[in-house]
Image (cartoon, rainbow, N blue to C red):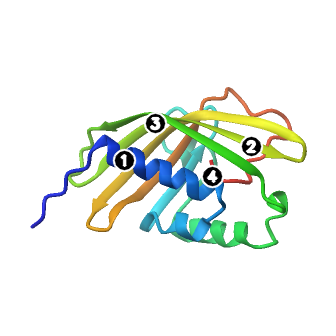
């Protein structure tokens, strides 16, 4: 049995590479960062840390919905992202946290996603709370959660892109 040691630098490199993929709209490569069966969540701005089903969410995708989201974003059917938004992501304060389940890494980080679309420029600020699985092929998401720091989103705001 091989013992894998993951450092904060490894996790930072993983998150920075993911940010580059998203900014370049390379969604197939982004999806490859997930293990089969993974989840993708963006809870509502009033989320209390309980189930996203109980408190509401902007995105609560299981594996099948995540794959469908990627397929739609790559097609012309994603009208809100045709042509695609221009985004720029900044990630900081990356921390590895304890997790009860052996072999899982809980990772938290702060993010700012700048988005330019239709002559508007918006900043989405929040924190990531991910579960990562280290393996011989590198890190993979089991859960990718983006928690917005906003009290509310302004009227007309769209989360038609990946946070």
Considering the image in quadrants, where does the N terminus appear?
bottom left
Determine if residue 65 is in view: no
> From the viewer's perspective, is residue 46 above or below residue 158?
above
Q: Vertical placement of 110 versus 10: above or below?
A: above
Dot 3 alpha-carbon crowd within 10 angstroms: few under 14, some 14 to 19, many 20 or more: some
**Counting residues from the N terminus, which is met first, the one under dot 2 or under dot 3?**
3
Q: Which residue is mark 3?
A: 109
Question: Element type at marker 4?
Answer: strand
Residue at image point 68% right, 26% down: 151
Q: Along the polypeptide, which appears first: circle 4 or circle 3? A: 4
Image depth: mark 4 or mark 1 in front:
1
Secondary structure at badge 1 equals helix
Q: Is residue 144 above or below residue 62?
A: above
Mark 3 or 1 closer to N-term? 1
Mark identifier at residue 115: 2
How far apart are labels 4 and 2 at the CA level? Answer: 18 Å
Q: Is residue 136 above or below residue 131?
A: below
Where is mark 1, residue-wise? 11
- Of badges 4 and 3, the one in the foreground is 3
Q: Is residue 140 visible?
A: yes
Q: CA distance from mark 2 to mark 1?
A: 24 Å
Report, in whole angstroms, how far the alpha carbon at label 4 lies from the one at label 3.
19 Å
Which residue is disc 4 drawn over? 59
Q: Earlier in the sequence, mark 4 or mark 2?
A: 4
Q: How many marks?
A: 4
Secondary structure found at label 3: strand
Residue 19 drawn at (x, y percent)? 55, 50
């Amino acid at each position: 049995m091989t013992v894998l040691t993951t450092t904060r630098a490894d996790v930072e490199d993983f998150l920075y590479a993911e940010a580059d993929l998203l900014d370049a709209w390379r969604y197939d490569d982004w999806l490859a960062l997930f293990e089969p069966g993974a989840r993708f969540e963006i809870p509502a701005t009033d989320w209390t840390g309980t189930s996203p089903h109980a408190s509401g969410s902007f995105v609560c995708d299981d594996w099948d919905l995540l794959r469908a989201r990627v397929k739609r974003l790559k097609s012309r059917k994603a009208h809100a992202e045709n042509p695609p938004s221009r985004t720029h992501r900044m990630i900081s304060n990356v921390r590895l946290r304890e997790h009860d389940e052996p072999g899982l890494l809980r990772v938290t980080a702060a993010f700012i996603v700048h988005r330019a679309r239709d002559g508007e420029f918006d900043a989405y600020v929040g924190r990531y709370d991910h579960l990562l699985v280290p393996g011989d092929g590198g890190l993979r998401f089991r859960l990718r959660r983006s928690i917005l720091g906003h009290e509310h989103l302004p009227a007309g705001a769209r989360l038609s892109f990946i946070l």
